[in-house]
Image: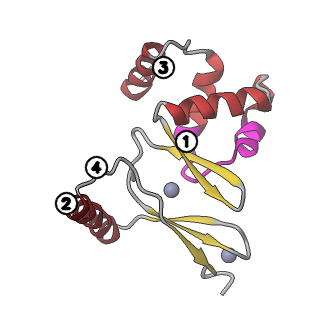
């Protein structure tokens, strides 16, 4: 098990849960996917390993509640992406209304501005921001 997995395992156990083989398999999918996945998409990747959809919903709820995963809502759907050990922790999302694709806007220039914006709001409003969700809506370059 690599370092990331070990510390996630520890976190899950600290919260009083078991690090089951199912959790590990789902985590592996999240690490290898570079896009946002719905519970059904995760299911289609792991169903041959005897993991049911209910287990995936349960696991994703747990992962979200303890901060391993970030849940993104769009049109009544939930998409999941890694929050811990993500190569792009803070980014803006764009959703295409035609093909329903969710794109990460994660080039460095935007990330730094986004971070700065968060800091400015924290200072001016005396808040402490833990997370941010910005969803831009429109047409992607293929659907334009
Ligand atoms: Zn599109
Ligand atoms: Zn994203």
Percent coordinates x, y for residue 131 in the rendering? 39, 50
Tag 1 near tag 4, CB within 8 Å: no
Q: Nearer the viewer, residue 50 or 58?
A: 58
Residue 138 in the image: above or below residue 113: below
Badge 1 density bin: few <14, some 14–19, many ≥20, Cα 10 Å: few
Residues at marks 4 and 2, CA–CA distance in whole angstroms: 9 Å
Residues at marks 1 and 4, CA–CA distance in whole angstroms: 32 Å
Mark 2 vs mark 1: in front:
2
Magenta region, residue range? 30-45
* Kind of element beneath mark 1: helix
- Image quadrant of residue 77? bottom right
Residue assigned mark 3:
12
Residue 35 in the image: above or below residue 42: below
Mark 3 vs mark 1: in front:
3
Q: Residue 123: which numbered mark, if any? A: 2
Tag 4 near tag 3, CB within 8 Å: no
Residue assigned mark 4:
128
Tag 3 near tag 1, CB within 8 Å: no
Q: Residue 125: which numbered mark, if any? A: none
Lower sequence index among marks 2 and 1: 1
Residue 51 in the image: above or below residue 75: above
Looking at the image, the residue that sits furthest to the bottom is 144
Is 55 left or right of 26, judged from the image as shown?
Answer: right
């Amino acid at each position: 098990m690599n370092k990331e997995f070990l510390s996630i395992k520890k976190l899950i156990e600290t919260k009083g849960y078991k690090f089951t083989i199912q959790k590990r398999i789902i985590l592996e999918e999240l690490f290898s996917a570079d896009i946002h996945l719905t519970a059904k998409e995760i299911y289609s990747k792991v169903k041959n390993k005897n993991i049911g959809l209910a287990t995936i919903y349960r696991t994703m709820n747990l992962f979200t509640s303890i901060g391993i995963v970030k849940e993104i809502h769009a049109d009544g759907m939930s998409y999941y992406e890694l929050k811990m050990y993500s190569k792009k922790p803070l980014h803006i999302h764009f959703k295409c209304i035609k093909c329903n694709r969710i794109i990460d806007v994660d080039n460095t220039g935007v990330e730094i501005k986004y971070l700065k914006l968060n800091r400015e709001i924290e200072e001016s409003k005396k808040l402490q921001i833990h997370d941010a969700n910005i969803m831009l809506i429109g047409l992607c370059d293929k659907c334009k």
